[in-house]
């Protein structure tokens, strides 16, 4: 399993205060990485940082609103100054909502696109600058969604657009930065229990529509993302760039 190890590397995880991001921080630490965790809720970040430190790794908790480009830069600076660099970025912060588009509020859609797409671009640019300067390569893993590639009966066009946009961003950055040894890939999860999906999955019809859209017939367990994340983050994926890895029970198969 050595190629999947991240000993001596520093990973930055955005949206690490809850859900997938909190889980990813612990997974990366178990693989040997020191971790910088970022989100707005500092009390929850502190709990995640304690979990990382319990794995014997160093952790910095950096309260960050990723929609502010200056805070994205400050987050990467904190990783470089505090832990010696940034080798992995897990671009995970995100938000979502459902509802029919003919009744959608344009300001709400714009805010979603700002968090899910523009902020992810700002974070990737900030990490890319540091990785290029360090001349040591790196890996950027952007958390897209199976909804970039497939639909369910739950209407969420703004969310799907933001997550599809991340796939275009991933491909272009992968081509731009290949010459620097920086790999850029997307992970596209199906449905997993989190704060974001709790209202949908608690609703009988919502849960039924997710199960119906998923050939494996169930939501994913968080640990089912561990191998795919580490594949893209580590040297195990050293020849993978510009790709989208679906982890979705078959939802987006084609
Ligand atoms: N759960 C799923 O089924 C699923 C499936 C596919 C993709 N995803 C994606 O996975 C990612 C994580 O979602 P989740 O399901 O784990 O939901 P979650 O528990 O609601 O986590 C969202 C995270 O994003 C952070 N965040 C939101 N806005 C932010 C901002 N402006 N600045 C910094 N951090 C911000 C939140 O932290 P603060 O509120 O503390 O800032 C939180 O840590 C998202 O990109 C989501 O689209 C999830």
Image: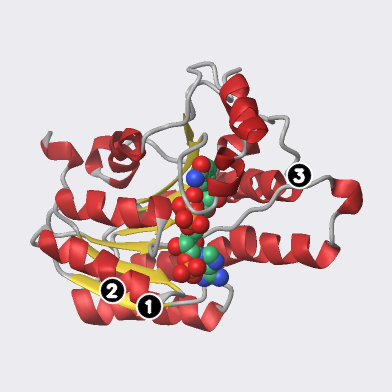
Q: Which residue is mark 1?
A: 42
In the displayed structure, would residue 203 be above or below residue 112?
Answer: above
Q: Nearer the viewer, residue 30 or 201?
A: 201
Residue 216: which disc? none
SS assignment at label 3: helix
| Residue 152 point in image, percent of width and height | 68, 30
Tag 1 near tag 3, CB within 8 Å: no
At a point 51% along the width and 36% down the height, the residue shown is 191
Q: Which residue lies most toward the left here?
A: 56
Residue 46: which disc? 2
| Residue 48 point in image, percent of width and height | 28, 64
Q: Which residue lies most toward the right here?
A: 102
Q: Nearer the viewer, mark 1 or mark 3?
A: 1
At a point 19% along the width and 62% down the height, the residue shown is 52
Residues under labels 2 and 1: Cα distance? 6 Å
At a point 21% along the width and 70% down the height, the residue shown is 59
Q: Residues within 10 Å of mark 3 (few under 14, many from 20)?
A: some
Q: Which residue is mark 3?
A: 157
Question: What is the quadrant of residue 1 in the picture?
Answer: top left
Res 166 visible: yes
Q: Nearer the viewer, residue 137 or 218?
A: 218
> As drawn, is 218 to the left or to the right of 35?
right
Task: Looking at the image, tell me whether mark 3 or mark 2 is earlier in sequence order.
Answer: 2
In the displayed structure, would residue 243 be above or below residue 217?
Answer: below
Tag 2 near tag 1, CB within 8 Å: yes
SS assignment at label 2: helix
């Amino acid at each position: 399993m050595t190629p999947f190890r991240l000993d001596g590397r520093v990973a930055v995880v955005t949206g690490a205060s809850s859900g997938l991001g909190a889980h990813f921080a612990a997974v990366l630490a178990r693989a040997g990485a020191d971790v910088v965790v970022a989100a707005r809720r500092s009390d929850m970040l502190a709990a995640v940082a304690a979990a990382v430190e319990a794995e014997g790794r160093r952790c910095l908790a950096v309260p960050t609103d990723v929609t502010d480009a200056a805070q994205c830069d400050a987050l990467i600076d904190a990783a470089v100054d505090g832990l010696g660099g940034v080798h992995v970025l897990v671009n995970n912060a995100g938000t979502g909502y459902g509802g029919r588009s003919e009744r959608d509020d344009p300001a709400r859609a714009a805010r979603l696109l700002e968090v899910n797409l523009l902020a992810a671009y700002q974070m990737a640019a900030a990490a890319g600058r540091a990785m290029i300067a360090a001349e040591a390569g790196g890996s950027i893993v952007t958390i897209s969604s199976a909804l970039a590639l497939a639909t369910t009966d739950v209407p969420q066009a703004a969310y799907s657009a933001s997550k599809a946009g991340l796939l275009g961003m991933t491909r272009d950055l992968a081509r731009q930065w290949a010459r620097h040894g920086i790999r850029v890939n997307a992970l596209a999860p199906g449905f997993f229990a989190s704060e974001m999906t709790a209202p949908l999955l608690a609703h009988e019809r919502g849960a039924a529509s997710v199960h119906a859209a998923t050939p494996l017939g169930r939501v994913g367990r968080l640990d089912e993302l561990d191998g795919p994340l580490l594949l893209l983050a580590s040297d195990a994926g050293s020849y993978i760039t510009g790709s989208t890895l679906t982890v979705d029970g078959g939802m987006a198969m084609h």
